[in-house]
Image (cartoon, rainbow, N blue to C red):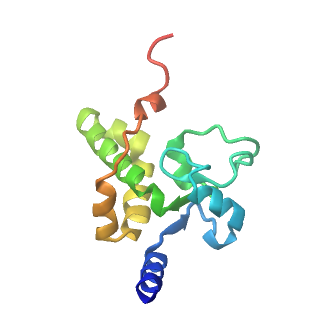
Amino acid sequence: MLTEAITDAEESARAVVVRLGGGSAAAVPDQVREQAAGGELDTLACACTDIEHAPGGGRCRQSFLTCFGCPNALVMDRHLPALLALAEVLREDLQRRDAAQWTARYGTTWQILTRDILPRFSPAQRAAAQQRQPHLMLDLLEGPTQW
């Protein structure tokens, strides 16, 4: 029982919950946090706490890459594999694209991802998440290639 309590305490201490775009993680209602923890609110690499009420008003219609700057975005431990996969895809894309073009398209996302989000996770968390990275369909973000 003591081992279980210590394990629970350690997991809780290492839990990462980040509300981006100036929002407060503590302000997220418990029900919404539970939905996010269960994956019900997932976007590309985070959760959206209120897709019906975007900062500009109405239902959100922005690219998933703009989520990291939105106060409705919530990053949890469960998103780390997708976050690492996104970082890798963006890194690979930089090798294929002109640097100025890449920066204009992905620069803000890259800065938030690499400076504000990923450093919050421990090296052990990142190493464990590397083992279960999903394939991200970022080519869908480019829009249709044929009409």
Question: Which residue corresponds to the image point at 55% horizontal and 39% vertical from the top-left?
Answer: 63
Indicate whether 3 appears above or below 130: below
How many circles with numbers are drawn on the protein? Answer: 0
Indicate whether 39 appears above or below 7: above
Q: Position of residue 137 (x, y in %)?
A: 42, 34
The residue most toward the top is 147
Left-right relation of 99 to 42: left
Q: Position of residue 99 (x, y in %)?
A: 29, 40
Q: 81 and 120: which one is in front?
A: 81
Q: 34 and 90: which one is in front?
A: 34
Q: 96 and 124: which one is in front?
A: 124
Residue 27 seen in render: yes
Q: 104 and 144: which one is in front?
A: 144
Indicate whether 24 appears above or below 102: below
Find residue 30 and report its image quarter: bottom right
Residue 73 seen in render: no
The residue most toward the front is 1
Find residue 113 and report its image quarter: bottom left
Question: Which residue corresponds to the image point at 75% horizontal and 46% vertical from the top-left?
Answer: 57
Question: Which residue corresponds to the image point at 66% horizontal and 55% vertical from the top-left?
Answer: 49
Question: Which residue corresponds to the image point at 46% horizontal and 12% vertical from the top-left?
Answer: 146
Q: Position of residue 66 (x, y in %)?
A: 53, 46
The residue most toward the left is 95
